[in-house]
Image (tube, rainbow, N blue to C red):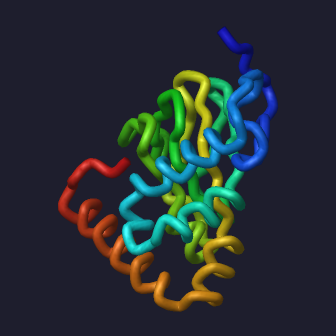
Amino acid sequence: MRAVPTRDTILPSSQGGSAGSAEHPHATLRRSVAALAAVPLFDGFSKRHLRRLAREADAVEFGPGRAIVEEGRSGEAMFVVLTGTARVVRAGRKVGALIPGDFFGELSALDGGPRTASVVPETPVEVLRVFRHTLRRMVEQEPALAMGLLEGLARRLRQVQHGTPVG
């Protein structure tokens, strides 16, 4: 079993994968692309766009109990859960759970505003972190991507409004 550090371990997704693994960089990139492709927010992204996004994303590990994001704090990134489980906490109450394939933080990643909930790992968690500036740069270079992001965000907001579990 791999020890989980008490501090964040940041691993560029294009340079080696999980801490302590001998995963080939191409396998790591494929894993990151697959994780991003499963995020409805990126439905409008081509494989080329997903590869580009994956190359600029970081794989980050968090130990249990240490918040990945905190409610009310501003944010500059969104996350996709690669491994582990986490709880979503709003106003001190657990309101949801996250498992591999789930994503969170997209609102703050798009507008830089405060987080609407905290996310706290229940087990060691590895997430793929995508920064706001990366999304912004891609949309500025290829404005057609903005429509895909808007459609994905609209679907996500409808889920929340209708009480469908998010993440």
Compared to residue 52, the image places residue 144 above or below, namely below
Viewer-closest of 115 and 47: 47
The residue shown at (69%, 58%) is 55
- Left or right of residue 99, residue 66 in this image: right
Compared to residue 57, the image places residue 61 above or below, namely above
| Residue 13: percent from left, percent from top | 70, 47
Q: Is residue 162 visible?
A: yes
| Residue 47: percent from left, percent from top | 49, 65
Viewer-closest of 115 and 79: 79
State which quadrant residue 109 falls in.
bottom right
- Left or right of residue 145, residue 134 in this image: right
State which quadrant residue 147 falls in.
bottom left
| Residue 161: percent from left, percent from top | 24, 65
- Left or right of residue 128, residue 166 in this image: left
Q: Quadrant of the N terminus?
A: top right
- Left or right of residue 150, residue 92 in this image: right
The residue shown at (46%, 71%) is 46
| Residue 32: percent from left, percent from top | 57, 48
Viewer-closest of 70 and 122: 122
State which quadrant residue 3 falls in.
top right
The residue shown at (36%, 71%) is 152
Viewer-closest of 139 and 119: 139
